[in-house]
Image: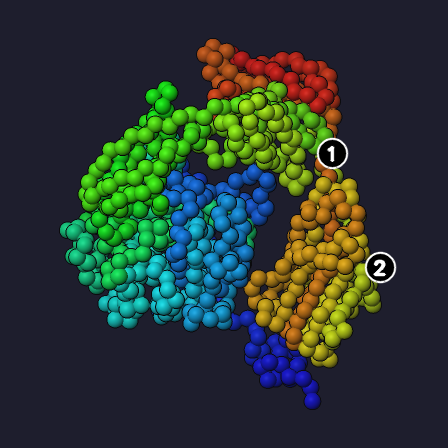
């Protein structure tokens, strides 16, 4: 008898089944779940886009079907995602330290608390991506192994649902934001079967059942209905638990479950650093074209007693708010999972607020934490007073103003006072330098989880639980810490306490930053000290030298980044004693970017098209386990045809058609590639497959010891389904410099589908210096001395290499209008500077090989 497919029909194969119009086997990919497809990205050109926001956002989840919810995560489409960062490169967007600074939160809070995240579908990469995010920002590991991270299905088990690209991005966003705000907290991820409102409600119940006191829900369904409370309300009604829900991303108008009077409804803001303000940050209502936080008046939900606004007879939305734009997220799953990106939406604000509740401590049994901010009387909140999310009859429900408003509620966190139950008092004062009497900015005044940072004038405000406060500390970079103090504070009392800090002796750290890939010329570079609030220093553009003063008897990490594009940043560890320290750095030109001036990219490529159908190509081998029923073949045994995007013969392995057996464990192994002279390398191949992750695994691995050990370089498909005419690119930079690198295409399946591979290519990349040197200088107006930004400077012998002058706002030692020009061949060159409204100016300069020449231009106006 012929073997049977999992659906019970004989093994005719997928092609035959399709021709016969027979139902697909049981392991086939199900139909796309509702809400899976995101709408096309919309470029925001509306005039009300907030200034300073650096992203264009598009929803990652589509419009939900009836009875279902959509996630409220929004993803930037204006930036190139970064899967791999250079040594000292910073991910785009706001990170944990930004959020902690903006909201006066402790850097290590959340210990002993469990925060639950409820989302639909599965993100198989959730834990791995979370590890990358936390490591990037120096947060403690949160893993299944150490008990910090737990992932369950909606019944509390490990029978995880199907994956979904959009909701996977939501999960990554939620995990990263909780980590940013409460890095010591345990995280419980509850993945529901799908995005049905009943399934999500069940997920909330399960989260509470498993012990979470804080439950974040970054999803919703537009509108407010009389059936909401009778049908789902009980699942969001858990006294003593902070149940938090996003208000939505479609501007004025409400969304369920944020409309429920038992949850904390979270609006959204645009958060931008502003060093000219006492707080150091500026917030307005988040508005991105037609997108903005949901707000309004619920028609069918009763007004909770703690809400006192008079323009809405029912439940008003929102209660509080937090950042909803330009936050850094790391996500690698699915079509949107391309590494470091910026996300936003009230989906970002909601887990932030859940984390703040966790920092503030366990809610009092029997109380509803959404009432806490209302009883704080404005204490512990930043009142957001500008911006709008639309138009409405009661203006405060769609426009920010003093006190309560719809888009931002009562405001954003300013410490923890507004998110805890119980009496509290306020401590204020000023921190100064004991020798000079000058204010100390960015000093930290802290007692346990309660933290405040001094503003530019040295003042601070810190809300504290009423009673005796022990171990109040004051710390600042470059100062000796003050001895901890104890004090007594009564409910409603305001105490004033000033502190003086003694400045530590400082020592100079000096050095030179140079090109490290062959030219060796000095580089204009930025040098920042990790953990220091002080401004970074810049090297001299001509000499590459820098000088920075740091407190003695301590170790520091210097982050060195070139101003010229195409160089990789580096970190440099230094230990400062009582004597000056020399710390030079050499920055390598990035062979993958290949944009560093003065370098030519050379590539070598070895390709294989599997053009001989009878056997593996020369140097390639097929290695199969003893119990494997069949292995890789090259003669298209089931006549599927080449759907990889290549042509002619191809490599294929089958697990879905007679006469092949149900089990495969087979490898297609490449010849050894010599990458000893390469600075980087990459693999590309064309492929076609159908897969079910529970029955089939496809990976590419690399070996530097002739197959004795293997390291994974491509983890294979991340979702069930079919892909054809697909070109896969895999970085192999970690193997540059190795003299023998083999690759294997490893297929393991138990009666699953198939994998086709064609046109395998390994490319080595090397940057080689081009003889020449650099000229740097500034371009100014000859009459006023004003720098000209956007002026063009060109070598007349190579006008196509012209560069534009730029601003240098972070470097007080170098004026605006700076240019850096590479000229081939040492010797005398003629440079010309041009700018609108000015007469061109030509100057001769001597270009020295691998050196920097200084040449400024002063252009005369045409009138």
Task: Give the image quarter of residue 12.
Answer: bottom right
How many residues crowd around disc 2 within 10 Å: few (fewer than 14), some, or many (20 or more)? few
**Position in image of residue 580 (x %, y %):** 57, 22
* Residue furthest to the top: 783
- Residue 112 horizontal side relative to residue 13, left or right: left
Q: Which residue is mark 2?
A: 618
**Position in image of residue 654 (x %, y %):** 70, 72
Residue under the point 31% across and 68% down = 235
Q: Is residue 137 visible?
A: yes
Helix, strand or loop for disc 1: strand
How many residues crowd around disc 1 within 10 Å: few (fewer than 14), some, or many (20 or more)? some
Residue under the point 66% across and 64% down = 698
Q: Nearer the viewer, residue 523 or 725?
A: 523
Between the residue at mark 2 and the residue at mark 1, the CA separation in whole angstroms equals 32 Å
Q: Which residue is mark 1?
A: 768
Vertical placement of 759 versus 766: above or below? below
Q: Nearer the viewer, residue 633 or 392?
A: 633
Residue under the point 23% across and 54% down = 371
Helix, strand or loop for disc 2: loop
* Residue furthest to the bottom: 1
**Position in image of residue 617 (x %, y %):** 82, 61
Circles 2 and 1: CB atoms closer than 8 Å: no
């Amino acid at each position: 008898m012929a073997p049977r497919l999992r659906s019970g029909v004989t093994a005719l194969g997928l092609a035959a089944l399709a021709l016969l119009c027979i139902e697909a086997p049981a392991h086939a990919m199900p139909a796309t779940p509702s809400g899976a497809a995101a709408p096309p990205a919309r470029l925001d050109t509306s005039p009300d886009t907030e200034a300073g926001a650096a992203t264009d956002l598009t929803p990652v989840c589509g419009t939900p079907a009836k009875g279902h919810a959509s996630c409220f995560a929004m993803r930037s489409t204006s930036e190139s995602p970064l899967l791999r960062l250079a040594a000292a490169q910073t991910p785009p967007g706001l990170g944990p330290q930004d959020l902690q600074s903006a909201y006066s939160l402790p850097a290590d809070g959340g210990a002993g608390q469990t925060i639950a995240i409820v989302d639909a579908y599965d993100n198989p990469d959730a834990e791995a991506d979370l590890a990358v995010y936390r490591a990037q920002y120096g947060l403690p590991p949160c893993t299944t192994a150490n008990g910090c991270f737990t992932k369950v299905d909606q019944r509390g088990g490990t029978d995880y649902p199907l994956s979904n690209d959009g909701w996977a991005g939501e999960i990554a966003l939620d995990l990263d934001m909780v980590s940013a705000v409460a890095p010591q907290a345990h995280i419980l991820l509850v993945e529901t079967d799908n995005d049905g409102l009943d399934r999500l409600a069940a997920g909330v119940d399960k989260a509470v059942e498993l012990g979470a006191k804080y439950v974040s829900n970054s999803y919703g369904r537009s509108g407010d209905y009389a059936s909401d409370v009778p049908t789902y309300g009980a699942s969001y009604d858990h006294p003593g638990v902070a149940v938090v829900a996003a208000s939505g991303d479609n501007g004025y108008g409400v969304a369920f479950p944020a409309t429920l009077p038992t949850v904390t409804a979270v609006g959204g803001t645009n958060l931008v650093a502003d060093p000219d303000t006492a707080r150091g940050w500026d917030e307005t209502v988040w508005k991105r074209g037609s997108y903005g936080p949901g707000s309004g008046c619920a028609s069918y939900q009763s007004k909770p007693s703690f809400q006192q606004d008079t323009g809405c007879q029912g439940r008003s939305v929102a209660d509080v708010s937090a950042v909803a734009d330009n936050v850094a997220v790391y996500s690698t799953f699915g079509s949107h999972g391309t590494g470091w990106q910026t996300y936003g939406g009230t989906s970002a604000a909601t887990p932030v607020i859940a984390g703040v509740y966790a920092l503030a401590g366990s809610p009092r049994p029997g109380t509803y934490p959404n009432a806490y901010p209302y009883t704080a009387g404005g204490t512990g909140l930043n009142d957001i007073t500008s911006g709008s999310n639309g138009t409405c009859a009661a203006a405060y429900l769609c426009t920010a103003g003093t006190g309560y408003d719809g888009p931002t509620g009562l405001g954003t966190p300013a410490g923890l006072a507004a998110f805890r139950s119980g009496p509290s008092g306020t401590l204020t004062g000023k921190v100064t330098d004991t020798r000079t009497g000058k204010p100390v900015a960015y000093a930290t005044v802290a007692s346990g989880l309660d933290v405040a940072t001094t503003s530019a004038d040295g003042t601070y405000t810190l809300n504290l639980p009423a009673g005796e406060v022990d171990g109040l500390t004051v710390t600042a970079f470059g100062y000796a810490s003050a001895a901890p103090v104890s004090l007594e504070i009564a409910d409603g009392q305001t105490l004033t306490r000033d502190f003086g800090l003694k400045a530590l002796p400082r020592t100079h750290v000096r050095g030179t930053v140079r090109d490290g890939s062959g030219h060796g010329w000095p580089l204009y570079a930025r040098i920042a000290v990790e953990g220091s609030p002080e401004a970074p220093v810049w090297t001299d553009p001509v000499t590459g030298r820098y000088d920075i003063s740091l407190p003695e008897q301590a170790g520091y990490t210097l982050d060195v980044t070139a101003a010229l594009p195409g160089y990789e940043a580096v970190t440099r560890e230094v230990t400062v004693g009582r004597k000056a320290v020399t710390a030079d750095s050499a920055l390598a030109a990035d062979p993958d970017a290949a944009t560093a001036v003065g370098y030519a990219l050379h590539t070598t490529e070895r390709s294989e098209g599997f053009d001989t159908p009878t056997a593996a190509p020369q140097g390639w081998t097929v290695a199969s386990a003893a119990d494997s029923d069949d292995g890789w073949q090259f003669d298209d045994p089931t006549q599927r045809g080449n759907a990889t995007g290549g042509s002619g013969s191809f490599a294929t392995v089958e697990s879905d058609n007679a006469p092949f057996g149900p089990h495969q464990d087979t490898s297609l192994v490449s010849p050894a590639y010599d990458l000893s002279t390469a600075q980087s390398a990459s693999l590309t191949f064309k492929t076609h497959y159908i897969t079910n992750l529970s029955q089939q695994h496809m990976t590419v691995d690399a070996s530097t010891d002739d197959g004795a050990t293997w390291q994974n370089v491509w983890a294979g498909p991340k979702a069930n389904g079919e892909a054809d005419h697909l070109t896969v690119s895999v970085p192999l930079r970690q193997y540059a410099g190795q003299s023998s690198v083999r690759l294997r295409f490893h297929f393991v399946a138990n009666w699953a589908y198939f994998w086709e591979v064609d046109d395998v290519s390994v490319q080595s990349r090397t940057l080689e210096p081009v003889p020449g040197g650099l000229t740097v200088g500034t371009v100014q107006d000859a009459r006023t001395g004003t720098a000209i930004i956007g002026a063009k400077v060109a070598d007349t012998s190579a006008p196509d290499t012209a560069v534009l002058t730029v601003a240098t706002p972070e470097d007080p030692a170098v004026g605006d209008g700076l240019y850096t020009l590479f000229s081939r061949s040492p010797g005398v060159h003629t440079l010309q500077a041009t700018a609108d409204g000015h007469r061109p100016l030509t100057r001769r300069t001597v270009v020295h090989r691998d050196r920097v020449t200084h040449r400024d231009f002063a252009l005369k106006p045409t009138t």
